[in-house]
Amino acid sequence: MLYTIAVVMLILWLLGMITSNTMGGFIHILLVIAIVVVLLRVING
């Protein structure tokens, strides 16, 4: 479930980069949050 969310955020981030949408900043924030959550899951085991 967590990895699915991270993949979705990555896809949305790439779409934001391609389209240069105004939602780009929001997508970048969500991507950073997703990466932090994945890293915490990996570190905690």
Image (tube, rainbow, N blue to C red):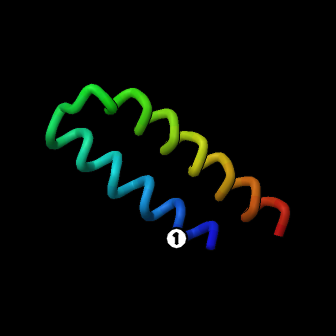
Residue under label 1: 4
Q: How many marks?
A: 1
Residue 19: give x, y in percent of width and height.
15, 39
Screen quadrant of the N terminus: bottom right
Screen quadrant of the C terminus: bottom right
Q: Which residue is drawn at 23% across and 39% down?
A: 17
Please rate how many residues cluster around mark 1, counting C-alpha atoms within 10 Å: few if below 14, some from 14 to 19, many from 20. few
Residue 12: give x, y in percent of width and height.
34, 51
Secondary structure beneath label 1: helix
Q: Which residue is drawn at 52% across and 70% down?
A: 4
> In the current view of this chain or complex, which residue is farthest to the right?
44
Q: Is residue 5 left or right of residue 11?
A: right
* Quarter location, residue 42: bottom right
In the image, is residue 16 above or below residue 22? below
Q: Is residue 40 left or right of residue 15?
A: right
Q: Is residue 30 left or right of residue 15?
A: right
Tag 1: amino acid: Thr
Q: Residue at x 50, y 33 (%)?
A: 29
Q: Residue at x 42, y 61 (%)?
A: 8
* Quarter location, residue 20: top left
